[in-house]
Image: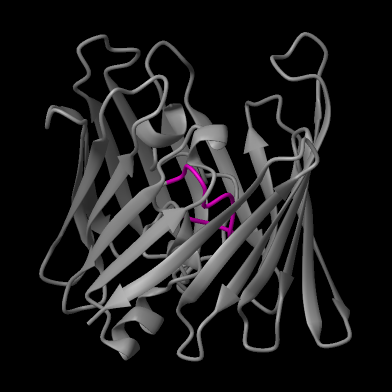
Amino acid sequence: MKKIFFPFFTSLLLNVTGFAQFPHCLMPGYVFGVIDDDTLLNTRKVLLNSGIKKIHAYQTSSESLKTHDSKTTVINESGNVESITACFSKNKDNKETWCVFDTISYDDRGRIREVRFRDRDGYELTQTILEYINEKEYKLITIAKMKNKQWDTLIDHRYFNTNGQMIKLIQVRKDRSPETSLYYYNADRFLDSVQYENSHLPTTVYKRNEKGKKKIIEAQIQNSKFIWVFNQSGQCESTKVTTIFPPHSNYTGTLKSESNYYYNPNGTLLKVTLKRSDKVKATMHYTYSK
């Protein structure tokens, strides 16, 4: 359930600045089970140009994936996500349908000011506040309000260059030394590598090549190899992930997964399909209201 309870930190290692609705989102990823992961595919620009007010999504294999099976996203007049409601159907573990809720508020410049996350009973689990120190720096504070707290407060300091790209991230966690990540970009302004100071993590290098009219990005992030394929329009068509699990972990061996993204003529998502080597398959369907 951590993928649901901590949506603002699940995608922290994968960054393409400027495409996401949210400042933490990086590269297109898992969509299934990560509430806001599809905002890199249904971008603010596309939603605003199409006059979309609500996004309705539902998937076919929520029980086997143990994730939400439907989601409703409300879009404001500026094309920004205003709220996300993710719901879980009845199954052998749940006697009734239940939902979780994200509510996002903005300042007068259209920047995210606050995010509140509530559980099925309306109890607020986390509150995330963004403090904009200047044009090149802001602080993100997440306060835990869970009854059985695993942590109290998480603080991120994020620094940007003149192109609006994140160049440094300092994470402060309770009872741990601050951790610093440095982000480097190539001449084309694409993310080239990420270095981690005071950490056991190796440098993440993003490799780029072309195959016909397709652009391909590859990266090795800890135990997983990622491959993203983009079309001529800049839309991500697929994400492939191969993970080799270390000994004594909950899952042993190698797990391969492939997500494919399909779009409507106006650029909005039509569906996302998932296929894994452990024979799990799923499809997320999208419809829209204006």
Residue 41: x %, y % from top left: 50, 69
In the image, 185 versus 216, the foreground residue is 216
Residue that appears at 39% across and 57% down: 23
Q: Is residue 111 above or below residue 198?
A: below
Depicted 211 relative to depicted 148: above or below: below
Left or right of residue 29, residue 114 in this image: left
Q: Is residue 234 left or right of residue 107?
A: right
- Residue situated furthest right in the rendering: 211
Task: Tell me residue 216's x, y (percent).
Answer: 79, 70
Within the magenta stretch, is there residue 265?
Answer: no
Q: Horizontally, is 201 left or right of 163 in the view?
A: right
- Region of the chain picked out in magenta, as a range: 25-34
> Is residue 28 located in the magenta-colored stretch of the structure?
yes
Position of 209 compared to 240: left or right? Answer: right
Position in image of residue 276 (x %, y %): 74, 44
- Whether 101 is drawn above or below 164: the answer is above
Report the front residue among 116 and 95.
95
Q: Main secondary structure of the magenta part?
A: loop
Can you say which quadrant of the picture contains the N terminus?
A: top left
**245 vs 99, nearest the viewer:** 99
In the rendered view of the protein, which quadrant contains the C terminus? bottom left
Total number of numbered discs in the rendering: 0
Residue at 23% over, 48% down = 130
Image quarter of residue 272: bottom right
Residue depicted at 20% across the width and 70% down the height: 110
Where is residue 141? Give x, y as percent: 27, 37
